[in-house]
Image (spheres, rainbow, N blue to C red):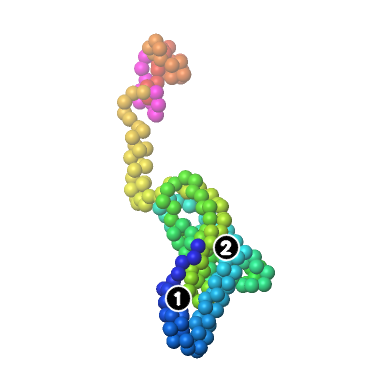
Amino acid sequence: MIRLTRAGWIFIALTLFLGFSAVNTGNNLIYIIVSGFLSLMAVSGFFGRHNLKCIEADIEFADEVYAMTETSVRVRMMNKKKFMPAFLLKANLLGKEALFYYLDPAKDETKTVQAVFSKRGINSVSSITVCSVFPFNFFVRCVNVQASKEVLVLPRLIKCSLTQAAQHGKRQAEGLHSDSRGYESGIISLRLYQAGDPLRHIHWKAAAKTDKLLTKEF
């Protein structure tokens, strides 16, 4: 994908203007200037296209990623060309940009961006868009570099007060205790055994002393 910059539009307009002037006037000097402009545009196209060749990218996420929370994403850009370096590479990932000014041949560099995932669950990144304005900022050339990765995004973190959390936990713990009779918690009294009472609730020591079956009430 190629997009003209503002400088590129001005350069093309100036080239066309000088071209029309050369045709109308027949001035050889203007012809030479127009030829130089066209040569400069050809050089820009050649080196700009070659600059994005043999570029690979990889991404690495943090150990824990939460929804709606900024997380660090590491972007590793690799220049696979053996002899030519790469210049002014801008990686677009999840709405963020990482700029790599210079990459040596057969070398790589890592940058970190702060990204936000809007939804929880499995999120995937299939590719990274790499753009460059090299060499003269006349054109912005972009290519999609494959970097398929998946990340598990945990639910959004909610800020709370430790004091409130402690009070809430205390209220929950208190809610588990009751003064009504049941079969849990502590013993509140002993009563005569009734048919249907669990045998394990009979107080055998008290029954041995009183010769009566007594049931523990909780």
**Residue at which label 2 appears:** 76
Along the line of sight, the residue nearer the viewer: 218 or 44:
44
Secondary structure beneath dot 1 equals: helix
Looking at the image, which is closer to me, 147 or 210? 147
- Residue 190 in magenta? yes
Q: Position of residue 202 (x, y in %)?
A: 44, 17
Mark number, residue 172: none
Identify which residue is drawn at 41% across, 15% down.
197
Q: Is residue 150 left or right of residue 198?
A: right
Would residue 84 be visible to someone looking at this image?
yes
Report if residue 188 lies within the magenta region: yes
Query: Could you say which quadrant of the image residue 25 lies in?
Result: bottom left
Q: How many C-alpha atoms fall within 10 Å of the one at disc 2: few (<14), some, or many (≥20)?
A: some
Give the residue type that dot 2 points to. Arg
Residues 32 and 69: in front is 32
Snapshot quadrant of residue 81 = bottom right
